[in-house]
Image (cartoon, grey):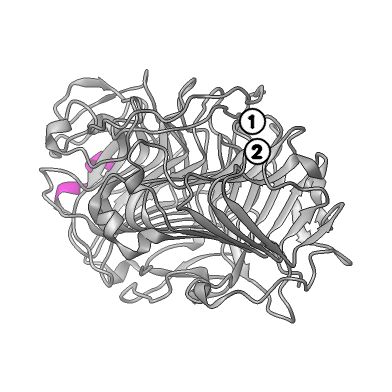
Amino acid sequence: MRSWFVPVGVGLAFISGACSSDSSSPEAAGGASGGVATGEPSSGGRGAQAGMNGAGESSGGRPTSGGRAARTGGSTGTEPVAGSPSSGGRSPSGGSAGSEGGSEPGAEPASGIDCSRSGFDAAAFGAVYEVGPGLDHETPSDVPWEALEAGSLVRIHYRDEPYRDKWVINASGTPDQPIVVLGVPDAGRLPVISGEGATTRSALDFWNEERGIIKIGGASVPEGPAASVAVLCLDIRDARPGIEFTSSDGSTQEYAQNAACVYLEEGTGIEIVASAIHGCGNGIFSSSGTADVRIAQNHVYDNGNPASAYEHNSYTESLGITFEANRYGPLCEGCDGNNLKDRSAGTVIRYNWIEWGNRQLDLVETAHDEFVADPRYAATWVYGNVLVEPDGAGNSQILHYGGDGDQQGRYRKGTLYFYQNTVVSTRSGNTTLFRLSTADESAVVLNNAFSVTANGSRLAIFSGEGTIDLGSNWLPSGWVESHDDVTGSIDARDNVEGVEPGFSDAARQEFSPRDGSALLDVGAVLPPAVIDHPPASQYVKHQAYEPRPASGEPDIGAFERR
């Protein structure tokens, strides 16, 4: 994937001139980059997730692009639900601020990227649209979205009142001349795009208006296709049932159950970066008509619908998708969805902080033959992440890999590469790290730190099926293979066991190794299979990353001691 910026210092510094770069990742770019300072409510969810459909998992199925015929409803899906909600969850105390670690209400939000330092050189664009009070375009609805071309820059400036506008981007940029929508903050405050009472520009004509606030791809006017599109530095919120908007034809409509803050329906080369995404059915939703997607340095939280397991903080199905340096927080109060749910081919999840959710990661099957046939479908990459499981946070499983529907022939049936992660569970009961759906799923699990506050016997490696290669991890003494019947197998070797791993300050969620930590210099050299996905960076709280130091043998976990 190609990205149009490189991180420099502690903020995003966009490339001037042609705005092009071959730096698609922290590995390529180096340096430290940070995310937007935003708070999150203390909330949670419960229940086991299974199956969904393109209309929002209301009856089981998966994301689909919908199409013109779906204008008055979502796209269809017929896969039955493969499970049912389980008990659990927490009693939220409300509020909208989050602590540094994302668990305590009422604290100051974490500091992060200064988006005011992020900006493309306007002279490099063929058209620049300035949006805000006293500018050429008072609101986003004044922007001629139907006329955007390659090399268009839309700069939305902060104002005290939220912008109540919604729109579609369905135009083709190029890697050298992208189409960019960039929020311009004021004193660290991002421009707010609210779906509540929002109005759609009358010149636009696109289907599934009830499915999202900012939509990319899928419209009659403009015709598209969407390509090389970036949305950055915005606070996008408020699209759930019960919230109304005015459509392009002037009628008042209500958002669908599966409405998304950011809805990616069709397009290639799409980036959603350094934004706050909250208060929607799905935070980010991508359909199978999307490819080459990058979700980076966002704060994604407070999404989902109460008493529903079918909407999630993000829900994606793309041909090629990378999640990096994001901060995923709790879903909304009483919402039972997963934190990051994905059905893509070519999934890379690296350097993220993912806390709460029914499961932190739910990586299941596609409904599309072209995805199954794509060689990338057989390998999923998860590395350098911090996964936090608070007590009472929904399902006791951290990660599900394989499938959740009745078409097992479409299950991933490949290898999950899970390495250099830090997983922390404060559950008082059992924690299970992996659920592999069938005997045909396998996981290579290397150099991870797995910590529980309960007795070590409360930690199980898997739910009993599939094959796990378990090497050079830190594990609590007394861990068990499974809390369930075992039909699969675990090849455990060279793991380090103990009472506690030696984090810098676990109570403050500082999970880097301290002096004398059992994690230091005991990791294994990673196998050739991961050569294209080296853990060259590490997460910085919050929505930030930095180069991972390289000295001696690798430390175990997501962090290398400097």
Q: Which mark is residue 98?
A: 2
Residue 272 relative to residue 542: left or right: left
Q: Earlier in the sequence, mark 1 or mark 2?
A: 1
Residue 192 found in image quarter? top left
In three-dimensional space, the C-alpha distance between marks 1 and 2, rounded to whole angstroms, equals: 7 Å
Q: How many marks?
A: 2
Whether label 1 touches label 2, CB < 8 Å:
yes
Q: Amino acid at mark 2?
A: Gly
Kind of element beneath mark 1? loop
> How busy is the neighbourhood of tag 2: few (under 14 within 10 Å), some, or many (20 plus)?
many
| Nearer to the camera, 74 or 401 | 401
Q: Is residue 174 left or right of residue 393?
A: left
**Left or right position of 252 against 344:** left
Q: Is residue 562 above or below residue 263?
A: below
**Spot occupied by residue 308 in the image (x, y as percentages of width and height):** 45, 23
Q: Amino acid at mark 1?
A: Ser
- Which of these two is toward me, 158 or 344? 344
| Residue 144 seen in the figure | no
- Quadrant of the rendering where the N terminus is positioned: bottom left
| Helix, strand or loop under label 2 | loop
| Extent of the magenta region | 138-146
Q: Which residue is mark 1?
A: 42
- Residue 537 picture location, percent across and down: 59, 69
How dense is the environment of label 1, judged by Cα within 10 Å: few (below 14), some, or many (20 and up)?
A: many
Task: Work out whether residue 324 can be spotted.
Answer: yes
Q: Residue at x 79, y 42 (%)?
A: 457
In the figure, residue 527 lies in which quadrant?
bottom right
